[in-house]
């Protein structure tokens, strides 16, 4: 690619080798020309699962129970209930414990 494509001087473009891979070229570009996080290719990876912040002891007991059941059984129902118990209030769908 040409130097005018990124908007920096030709001298800087020539100082970076013409046959350098794109990963190595990132160090030669000015900060404004670097790209952001590619969300479509995976984006940021969340390592910690969301934990319910509820102070309600009954909800906490339900979370403990369904965490155990989701881990120890192969039932998809238990995993769905656990996921919904851990959702935020804003994104939580209606929750029924009957199958």
Image (cartoon, rainbow, N blue to C red):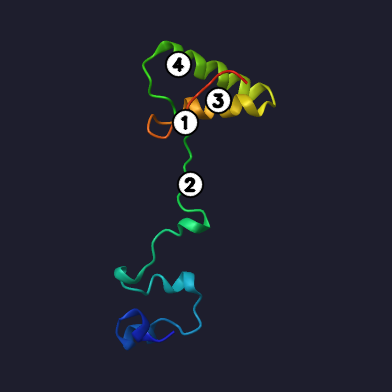
Mark 4 and mark 1: Cα distance apart in space: 16 Å
From the image, tell me which residue sits under label 3.
81
Spatial CA distance of label 2 from label 3 is 23 Å
First in residue order: circle 3 vs circle 4 = 4
Circle 1 is placed at which residue position? 93
Going from N to C along the chain, the mark reached first, 3 or 1, is 3
Image quarter (top left, top right, bottom left or bottom right) of the N terminus? bottom left
Please state which of the two labelled residues, at mark 4 or mark 1, is closer to the viewer.
1
x, y percent for residue 25 = 43, 74
* Residue 71 in the figure: left or right of residue 94: right
**Cβ atoms at labels 2 and 4 below 8 Å apart:** no
Where's residue 14, x and y in %? 38, 87
Q: Secondary structure at mark 2?
A: loop
Q: Nearer the viewer, residue 65 or 27?
A: 65
Say above or below: 7 vs 34.
below
Name the secondary structure under disc 3. helix
Q: Foreground: 30 or 37?
A: 37
Coordinates of residue 6 in the picture (x, y in percent): 35, 79
Residue 3, picture quadrant: bottom left
Q: What residue is drawn where x is 40% and y is 31%?
A: 88
Q: Which mark is residue 45?
A: 2
């Amino acid at each position: 690619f040409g130097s005018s494509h990124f908007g920096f001087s030709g001298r800087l473009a020539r100082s970076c080798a013409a046959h350098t891979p794109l990963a190595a070229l990132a160090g030669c570009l000015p900060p404004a020309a670097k790209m952001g996080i590619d969300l479509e290719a995976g984006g940021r990876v969340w390592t910690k699962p969301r934990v319910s912040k509820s102070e309600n002891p009954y909800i906490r007991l339900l979370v403990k129970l369904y965490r155990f059941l989701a881990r120890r059984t192969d039932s998809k129902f238990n995993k769905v209930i656990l996921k919904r118990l851990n959702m935020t209030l804003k994104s939580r769908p209606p929750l029924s414990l009957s199958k």
